[in-house]
Image: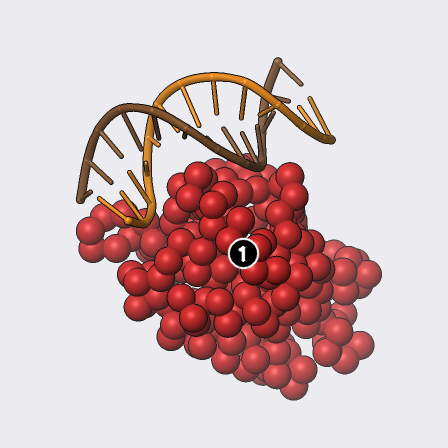
Chain colours: A red, B orange, C brown
Amino acid sequence: MISSERLSAIAHWSLELTESERERARRGVIEKSFGAGAFICHQGDRYDSWAGVIEGLVQLSTFSDSGHTVTLAGLAPGQWFGEGSVLKSEKRRYDLIALRQTRLALMDLTTFFWLFDNSVGFNRFLVRQFNERLSQFMGLVEHDRMATAPARVARALSLLFNPMLNPRHEAVLAITQEEIGQLSGLSRQVTNAALKTLETAGLVQAERGKIHLRNWQGLKDFVEGG
DNA sequence: GCATTAACAGCCG
DNA sequence: CGGCTGTTAATGC
């Protein structure tokens, strides 16, 4: 279990809960760390908790029929995930990998389902989350095939910065070009060149190990525009 | 062509 | 020093 203050700091959705709901939630959450490169869970595992990223970076990926990995999303601090598999109580459909030293908050299923059954605020959050995910994945299929390198980098970054999923969003994200490449499915060299393009367009600003967001809407538009 | 790996120098914490 | 970045050269689909 964690403190009420801690919950507020790492789970923006908790602010929508009533006092008693928040109390219930904090008692069902623990924290756990993962080393760089560690599998948080493999495709096919049964999952026993809902999770949020406290610090670090998580890659959500799967294997294409041709055998190489396809990254579906990157998860930055403040983002919560796994509600789909939890609600359907099915096996995980994706691999979750810690791209670097990562700390997660884990909520047990009893607590999750109690909130699901009792909290209006929690359900509002879940609906928004599903809505957002839906639009993300709808655009993904054709995008991965045809998109240019800068567009793919723009997509990875826009998801990480996504203020709907991550209202704690800060204008700066701690991520290396190597990691952006892993999330975009590109080499570091190409990622570097793509970032230059996005910088020139005034959408982001690269710094050593950091990306500053300058124009989030512009970043999203860049994804669509190819 | 465009992306990938390999290699290397420069930089910064 | 070690990790990140910017660039170039050689190679592959």
Q: Is residue A5 above or below residue B11?
A: below
Q: Quadrant of residue A216?
A: bottom right
Tag 1: residue type?
Answer: Leu
x then y, percent, for residue A27: 71, 62
Q: Is residue A22 left or right of residue B3?
A: right
Residue at x 42%, y 58% (from the top left corner): A152
Comparing A125 with A190, the one in front is A190
Q: Is residue A134 above or below residue A155?
A: below
x then y, percent, for residue A82: 49, 64
Which image quadrant: the C terminus of chain A?
bottom left
Residue designated by label 1: A198
Q: Is residue A179 above or below residue B7?
A: below
Comparing B8 with A100, the one in front is B8
Comparing A3 with A176, the one in front is A176
**For mark 1, does the 10 Å Cα neighbourhood hold few (<14), some (14 to 19), or many (20 or more) residues?**
many
> Which residue of the protein is positioned furthest toward the bottom in this rendering?
A120
Can the viewer see residue A105 in this picture? no
Q: Is residue A188 left or right of residue A75?
A: left
x then y, percent, for residue A166: 64, 66
Residue at x 57%, y 80% (from the top left corner): A128
Which image quadrant: the N terminus of chain A?
bottom right
x then y, percent, for residue A144: 33, 61
